[in-house]
Image: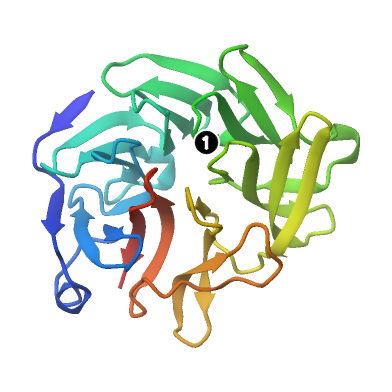
């Protein structure tokens, strides 16, 4: 485990109006108030100009993400953790799309082939456990008891206590030919929101409800232009997805009610003059972290 002190540039109370004049190496991570959108911090990693998939640890002290250096590709991605108070960066090595355990001691990660698959990895040590060599885009449930990931057009749910896994869709009649990465559990750990490609090629954002009597699938909205990220608010009936805003001409975060039927609308607590996505709410619902670029 490589530890680099103060490599992360964490800038407190960085206003939108002043941030546009700053030179930034690639994408940055914004940490903002989830209620009013006010920017609290900016995370910039000069050594890793490509940073993606940020998620706040349940205690709110750290943000995990993946990133790779200039001249590298996404298959070289490392799992990176930044302490918000000090800006200290911890490099956990190869991996992508980290998702925190409920106690904050582990992250679930995906790795690219040839030694790829989905894993859980300790944060304070080097312990790593393979979950599924053929899985991708693993996400930890908020209650800490389950993992969800995509595999061969299906969603797999892994029970950590029993060490058992099951595919949620009947393989003899799969509704999807492909399920994308960065799905998201509901706060009660009973539903999963994801982007999928139907067998006829239709793209949609859908919600799968897990129940003893089977899985209830709800197609929520078309996803032709939706990027592969989902954020589910821990208390409000709101899911965020990123997609281009035709009027603004930028990638923006759009909100919809998981239990409603209205189409997604632009979330108005974000800068309209930047591309924004890759978002995640803190467990207390007070903050949001997201990727942003000019």
- Residue 21, x across and y down, in percent: 15, 77
Left or right: residue 273 compared with residue 226: left
- Residue 188, x across and y down, in percent: 57, 38
The residue depicted at 49 percent of the width and 33 percent of the height is 110
Q: Nearer the viewer, residue 127 or 18?
A: 18
> What is the quadrant of residue 216 in the picture?
top right
> What is the quadrant of residue 186 in the picture?
top right
Q: Residue furthest bottom?
A: 247
Q: Nearer the viewer, residue 218 or 4?
A: 218
Q: Residue furthest right?
A: 172
> What is the quadrant of residue 2 in the picture?
top left
Left or right: residue 205 compared with residue 63: right
Quadrant position of the N terminus in the picture: top left
Q: How many marks?
A: 1
Q: Which residue is mark 1?
A: 139
The residue depicted at 39 percent of the width and 51 percent of the height is 285
- Residue 172, x across and y down, in percent: 90, 34
Viewer can see residue 152: no
Colouring method of the image: rainbow
Viewer can see residue 255: yes
- Residue 104, x across and y down, in percent: 34, 28
- In the depicted structure, whether residue 294 falls above or below residue 51: below
Quadrant position of the C terminus in the picture: bottom left
- In the depicted structure, whether residue 96 falls above or below residue 46: above
- In the depicted structure, whether residue 62 falls above or below residue 256: above
Disc 1, SS: strand
Label 1 CA crowd tier, 10 Å (few <14, some 14–19, many 20+):
many
Left or right: residue 192 compared with residue 109: right
The residue depicted at 48 percent of the width and 53 percent of the height is 233
Left or right: residue 287 compared with residue 207: left
């Amino acid at each position: 485990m490589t530890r680099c002190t103060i490599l992360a540039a964490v800038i407190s109370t960085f206003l939108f109006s002043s941030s546009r004049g700053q030179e930034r190496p690639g994408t940055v991570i914004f940490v903002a108030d989830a209620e009013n959108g006010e920017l609290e911090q900016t995370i910039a990693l000069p050594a890793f100009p490509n940073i993606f998939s940020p998620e706040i640890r349940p205690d709110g002290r750290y943000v995990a993400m993946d990133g790779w250096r200039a001249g590298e590709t996404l298959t070289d991605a490392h799992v990176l953790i930044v302490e918000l108070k000090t800006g200290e960066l911890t490099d956990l090595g190869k991996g992508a799309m980290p998702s925190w355990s409920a106690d904050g001691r582990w992250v679930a990660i995906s790795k690219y082939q040839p030694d790829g698959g989905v894993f859980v990895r300790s944060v304070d040590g080097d312990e790593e456990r393979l979950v599924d060599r053929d899985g991708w885009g693993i996400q930890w449930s908020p209650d800490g008891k389950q993992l969800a990931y995509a595999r061969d057009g299906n969603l797999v749910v892994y029970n950590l206590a029993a060490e058992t896994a099951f595919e949620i869709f009947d393989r003899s009649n799969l509704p999807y030919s492909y399920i994308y990465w960065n799905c998201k559990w509901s706060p009660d750990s009973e539903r999963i929101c994801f982007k999928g490609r139907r067998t006829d090629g239709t793209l949609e954002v859908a919600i799968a409800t897990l129940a003893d009597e089977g899985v209830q699938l709800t197609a929520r909205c078309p996803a032709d232009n939706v990027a592969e990220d989902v954020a589910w608010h821990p208390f409000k009936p709101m899911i965020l997805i990123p997609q281009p805003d035709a009027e603004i001409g930028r990638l923006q975060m759009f909100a919809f009610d998981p239990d409603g039927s209205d189409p997604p609308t632009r979330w108005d607590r974000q800068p309209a003059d930047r591309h924004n996505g890759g978002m995640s709410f803190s467990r207390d619902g007070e903050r949001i972290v997201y990727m942003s670029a000019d």
